[in-house]
Structures are given as C-alpha cells and as structure tokens.
Image (tube, rainbow, N blue to C red):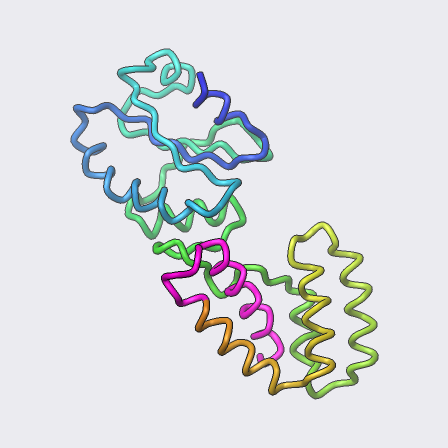
Amino acid sequence: MILMRLFFDKSKNVFVKVYAPWCGHCKSLAPDWEKLAKAFDNEPNVVIAKLDATKFPDTASRFGVSGYPTLLFFSAGDKTPKTYEGARSLPELLAHVNEQSGTFRHENGELTEKAGRIEAFDAVASQFINGDQEALFNSVQQLAQEHKDKPTASLYAKLFEKVKASGLPYVESEIKRLKKMAASSSVAQSKRDEFAIRANILSAFTS
C-alpha cells in the first residue's frame, strides 16, 4: 500500500486524518483539512494525508483507531505515530504541523517572518551595521562552518558579504525589492519562498 510506505518514509513528516465517509465530525473537519494540505504544498518533507477507514480497516486497526476522525502524526525522525489530541480548527492544526516539522507556514501557504532564520547569525547581524565589521565578519565565517548542516547558513554568509560591501542602503532597498517580488501572484511559490527567506535574513540587520 503506497500510503503505508509514505507513513514510514523517514524523510517525511506525515499528518494523517483517519476518517469514515458517514462521520459527521469528519465532514466538518474536511474543509480545514484541505486548506491545511494546501498550506504545505511547497514543503517537500511534509505530507497532509487522509485514510478512509472503511476502505482500509486493517490499517486503521493497526494504529488502534476506534473513533473518527483520528489524527495521527508520523515524524520524520520517529515513525511511531502520535495521536493529535488538540483543537481541530485550522490555526491549531497549522501550528501543530509547524512545531512538529520545523516549518514556518501561514494558513495561506506563505512563509512566516521566522523562516530561514538562524539565531546565532541574527545575533551578529544585529550588531553588524554599527559594529566592528571586520571582527564580526570573521565570526560569521566560523558560524558558517558550525552551522553548515542548516540550509540557510551559506546564504547568511553571502548576505553578510553584500552588507559589508554596501551597507544599510542595500539592506533596506533589497528587503523592499524582495518583498515586492514575493507578493506577486505571477511568481511560483518556490521562488516566493526564496525571496521571503532572503528578506527575513536581511531584516536581522535592522533589528
């Protein structure tokens, strides 16, 4: 069963709704579940799924499902499913997925202002414009090595170089430009994410 393999894929965080077509609560949850799935469309490591227990009763039974809907979260690092017992409105469901997956999505699928940020770099960035840039830049190179496993570490290093060369005017104009591009509906979501992350990081220099 393809869905079962997905549940236990160690590269994926999977949030699954186990439901029955006749269940009134399941029908009430359905619209928000679809919105939740759409919000994470551009997250390759997050899957919002649903399982019809009337079609796959053995699978539902395997996970101890006895009522509907039951919401199960399969973390990428730990494939033992955990039953979600929290509130079932869209904001609470979204917050749960973000917390468990390390993602930063709004309900509309756009990234939050925290996306891409690394606290250690931010601490240096906040001092950079008016501080000893040579000394701070050296510490950035060290941080880039220490955090090389994090996707945005190299981007931080490149942006520090840009800011060192061009100063605050670059930061302000580039944030404005990036936010304008990220707000365009004609741009693919993957590119809007890229623009938003760059703007998020640059904002650390003005905090």
Part of the protein shown in magenta = 182-207
Q: Residue furthest front?
A: 186
| Direction from residue 3 to residue 199 in the image, left or right | right
Q: Is 99 located above or below residue 158 in the figure?
A: above
Q: Which of 113 and 77 is in front in this view?
A: 113
- Residue drawn at point x = 42 percent, y = 35 percent: 15
Residue 170 in magenta?
A: no
- Residue drawn at point x = 83 percent, y = 78 percent: 135
| Direction from residue 147 to residue 19 in the image, left or right | left
Q: Where is residue 63 in the image (x, y as percent from the top left)?
A: 42, 20
Q: Position of residue 9 (x, y in %)?
A: 55, 28
| Direction from residue 123 to residue 65 in the image, left or right | left
Which quadrant of the structure image shows residue 116? bottom right
- Residue drawn at point x = 44 percent, y = 37 percent: 47
**Position of the N terminus by quadrant:** top left
Which quadrant of the structure image shows residue 2? top left
Q: Is 192 located above or below residue 3 in the figure?
A: below
